[in-house]
Image (tube, grey):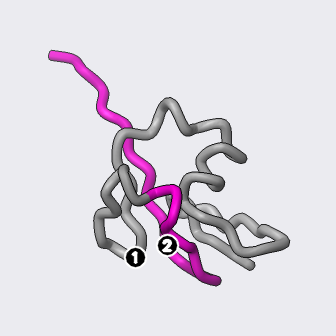
């Protein structure tokens, strides 16, 4: 299964949830928001949100500054 994550294509052997993807990428504690195919996925549903081949995923974190 291929996923496009922040513009970069990555390949996975099996279907994966959004939460498992974040764990595999070591980003679970860093990502504040996620969108799949331009739609925001609420954080409380990441563990059950099943990703599909060629999904376009944008992972966002918030940075403070001034």
Q: Which residue is mark 2?
A: 56
Q: Find residue 65 and report its horizontal and vertical position in percent.
A: 21, 17
Query: What residue appears at the point 36 percent right and 52 percent down from the top-left corner?
Result: 44
Q: Are marks 2 and 1 in contact (CB under 8 Å)?
A: yes
Report the span colored magenta: 46-66
Residue 1, placed above or below residue 7: below
Q: Find residue 29 and report its horizontal and vertical position in percent.
A: 51, 31
| Residue sticking out furthest to the top | 66
| Residue sticking out furthest to the right | 13
Query: What residue appears at the point 53 percent right and 63 percent down from the top-left corner?
Result: 7
Dot 2 falls on a residue whose secondary structure is strand
Q: Find residue 16 and report its horizontal and vertical position in percent.
A: 67, 67
Q: Tell me the tag on residue 37.
A: 1
Alpha-carbon distance for marks 2 and 1? 5 Å
Residue 52, placed above or below residue 58: below
Q: Nearer the viewer, residue 1 or 49?
A: 49
């Amino acid at each position: 299964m291929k996923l496009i994550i922040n513009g970069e294509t990555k390949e996975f052997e099996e279907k994966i949830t959004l939460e498992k993807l974040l764990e595999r990428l070591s980003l679970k504690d860093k990502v504040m928001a996620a969108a799949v195919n331009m739609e925001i996925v609420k954080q409380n549903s990441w563990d059950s949100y099943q990703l599909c081949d060629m999904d376009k995923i944008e992972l966002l974190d918030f940075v403070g500054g001034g």
